[in-house]
Amino acid sequence: MNKQVWILSLCQALLTTGNIVLISVTALIGQSLAPMPSLVTLPVAIQFIGMMCATIPASLIMARIGRKRGFTLGNMIGIAGAACCIYALWLANFYLFSVGTFLLGIGIGFGTLYRFAAMELCDVKYHSRAISISMAGGVLAAILGPFLAVQSREWLSDTFIGPFVGVLLLYVLSLCLLQVVALPKAPGYATAKTGQRLSQLLTQPNYLLAVASGAVAYSVMILLMTVTPLAMMGCGYSFEQSTQVIQWHVLGMFVPSFFTGHLIDRIGAKNTILLGAVFMLMCCIVNLTGTTLIQFNIALILLGVGWNFMFIAATRFLTMTYQPEDKPKAQACNEFVVFSSVTIASLLAGWLNTTIGWYQLNLVTIPFMFVIIAALFIFKPQLNPSSQHK
């Protein structure tokens, strides 16, 4: 495995650490600053709108200027977003804070492509493992993120400015680290405007199944994870306790990355997606049985593991459904659909929690998992072996 993959994994870890800090505090900030209860999760939703807006441009920009410059640009936008959030919190301005989370979302949108860049740095037989390793940095993030969220809260004041100072420093560190990564110009960049039309890609069942699996995995995970701190606060749990639950959840998201690639090689991407869907269904069942601290912990761990299996396997499955010349548009479309779904889920999170409550919110997610499970059995992947080298 190319050592550069491990450096990218560390960059991904720094990005994910910042994301965990954001997830830990943004909804709570919204609760204190929002002019009405239904807008509590608006900054979270705005962050994902930023991700959604960045997905297509990020892939196409990297097709033109390369991965390294593209990731550098994304980090610089993230730094600007963190600075904007700090200023907004100092002013106690809810809408300016949302602008800052939008910029952070754009930076995160560029960072979502780390897993594709990792594949370009190693041999074909290591592609599944490269995706897993690029995501495995989240283990460090699972430890550092909640710790930073709690410890930095009192750095400057009791207005959550400290955590965003921490996020800014993480982006600066990642920006420095990127400058030593030897990212080659990937094959297919020069032919980004050739190949199949996007409409042709969207008529391929295998491509659609891969995109849908990633979208459902990520949107369901974000919906439940975003609302969990609010649900726990409603049950009387402290900020530290909800942060600990998020920490266990993130460990569930990323610890399996050390062996998910091997699992995909052994049982196939399709079966790994199916296994992940089962874990996410188990999460909903646990949430429906009660609201004790141990149940929140178990449910969020199951949610994390299910997301890991589904999302990594969907990414690997996706890369086997297009030709090299279709890479920029295929990846851009996938990221746009996935993070559009995530944006919708985060926009609905606060409203659903307010209107239907925690129990019914879990019920809402179950049909989506059954749709993916049914599709996995209905569509039999017939992949062109020549397309598996990307």
Image (cartoon, helix red, strand yellow):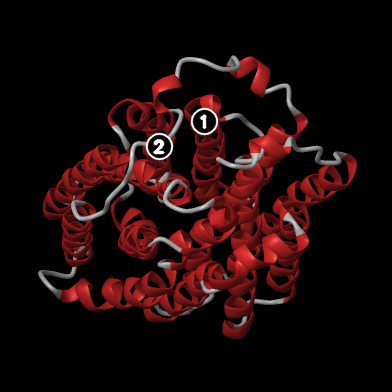
User: Does 73 sit above or below residue 250?
Assistant: above
Q: Is residue 107 left or right of residue 84?
A: right
> Disc 1 and disc 2: Cα gap in Å?
10 Å
Residue 6 in picture, x, y percent from top left: 37, 64
User: Does 313 sit above or below residue 147?
Assistant: above
Q: Is residue 65 left or right of residue 253?
A: left
Q: Residue at x 66, y 45 (%)?
A: 317
Residue most toward the right? Answer: 378
Q: Is residue 289 left or right of residue 241?
A: right
- Amino acid type at circle 2 is Ala
Residue 221 in picture, x, y percent from top left: 58, 57
Q: Residue at x 36, y 47 (%)?
A: 111
Of the pair 3 and 377, the residue shown nearer to us: 3
Q: Crowding near pointer 2: few (<14 within 10 Å), some, many (20+)?
A: some
Residue 124 in picture, x, y percent from top left: 56, 50
Residue matched to label 2: 186
Of the pair 79 and 358, the residue shown nearer to us: 79
Residue 57 in picture, x, y percent from top left: 37, 27
Q: Crowding near pointer 1: few (<14 within 10 Å), some, many (20+)?
A: many
Quadrant where the C terminus is found in the figure: top right
- Amino acid type at circle 1 is Lys
Residue matched to label 1: 327
